Image: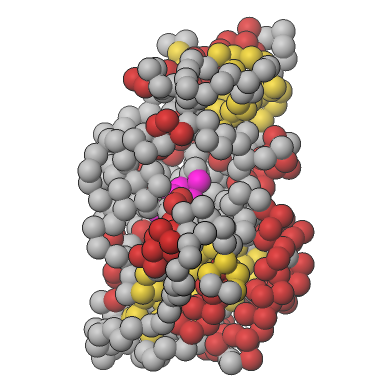
Amino acid sequence: MSSRWHSFLIGFRPVETQPVPPHRKNPYNILILGFDSTSHYGFMRKMPKSYKFLSEKAVIMESYNIVGSGTPGALFPLLTGKPVEEHPDTRKSITETKVDDKSFIFHLVKQYGYRTAYFEDSPEIGTFQYKYNGFQHQPADHYLRALLLEKAYHDPHRYQYHCLGAIPQYQAYLNLANECIQLDGNKFCFTFISDISHDDFNLISTADEAVLAFLETLNGRKVFEDTLVIVMADHGHRHSAFRSTYQGKIEERTPLMAIILPEKLKQRRPNALKALRQNKDVLTTHYDLHTTLLDVLDLKDYSNKYKVPGADIPRAMTLLEPIPSNRTCSEAGVMQHWCACAVWVNVTRASPMYARVANVLADYIDSLTLQQRSKCARRKLQSIVTVLQRTVNNHLLKYGIDASDLTNPTFEPPRAPMEYYQAQIILSPARAVFEGTLTYNTRADAFTMSTNYISRISTYGDESKCITASHPHLGPFCYCNDRKTPQA
């Protein structure tokens, strides 16, 4: 450890804000507290005191569904209204293009006089830096990445990874959120905590008392009067033995989403709370949350009006108005791989499709590292866990219309009926567990798939360390040749 003493001072610098347009009266503040890898039920189990508070004060969305893979698959839609695929490609090793900070909601609300803050811990796995090229300019007025990188520089061995100075890092973030909402003027504050939930979800329970105290403090200061308060997550836990179970699969797809509407908004729009409560059991997504934020801010004209081809309703709908109870994943822009309400049935071992689907998926995963074969070992099928077939019961799916097609403006649905398969397989080396969804064209007798449809279920740690810096998007698929091959 360093023999030199050092310290960090965190505060809010003065920020010049735009004047509030004269036609905007009594706009609301936004305060979002997010946790990485935290499912609805996981939060209920590990954070009972905080959950009890939210169950009394908030509307907790019971059928909230992710729309893509990992944290970027959640935060891109939440903060921009569009999935990763509808943004210019900004992946490392693919391009040098930076993530467009002006497409984020922070930039929009600043034009209406808001002071913005985006606090995200764990800079080594930053949402827009780990696999992407980061921002050209910082996305919000207050942004902690520079400080955390400095902390990492002074603490290269991560001796105090979970602390910021003398207090838990999560407590520092809660303190900042608390201070942020007390600043003058209108505020939009998004705080995202991952260090106590991303790697080991059991650690999140250490924050239960602190989160409860944070929420009680907001309540005591009457923050709920004029502030939309959201406690949420990006997705459930993705890499663990629990994820290999059916419950774990569902929980990955159903993150925490608890919404406390401003009291003043409920008084002015009494139907908003009624609709929100009605929607809690309806399929909803991060697209909808983005539109809801705009609705609360009286900026709904900026919402994404996109409709899935063949759908009668927009992909993104405000939670403050009734959403059809029979809404499907295809209509909501949820890929079938991520749809928690999809009905799958087992394919028997005797079926020709059982081994075929598993082998096609295994070969595809191996092909992803073909260009890095000098560094990444070949992946081979070791065993098949399950093969499932999707029961198709709506017109959008019957002819292959799925979220993967929606970014193509010239998309034309195939004329042959489609079938959907999902396989969980184990590949060597290192018994890597993958789950992938494949689309089968019955007329062409051919499969199509995408990395967007593949989940790496087992942890992979530093298996792909040899390409992490250059090709981080291949991390789940690569097993470095310079590693000692483990025993089967």
Left or right: residue 150 versus residue 178 is left
**Which one is nearer the viewer's eye here, 407 or 397?**
407
Q: Position of residue 154 (x, y in %)?
A: 43, 61
Classify 80 as above or below 379. below
Q: Which of the 4 image quadrants contains residue 446?
A: top left
**Which one is nearer the viewer's eye here, 381 or 316?**
381
Point 48% across, 65% down: residue: 3
Classify 380 as above or below 83. above
Classify 336 as above or below 72. above
Left or right: residue 44 versus residue 440 is right
Q: Which of the 4 image quadrants contains residue 250?
A: top right
Residue ranking furthest to the front: 3
Give the overall secondary structure of the magenta segment.
Answer: helix
Q: Position of residue 26 (x, y in %)?
A: 40, 90
Q: Position of residue 166 (x, y in %)?
A: 58, 74
Point 32% across, 75% down: residue: 141
Tell me if residue 450 is in the magenta stretch: no
Point 24% across, 58% down: residue: 136
Q: Magenta residues?
A: 70-76
Q: How many marks?
A: 0
Point 29% across, 44% down: residue: 90
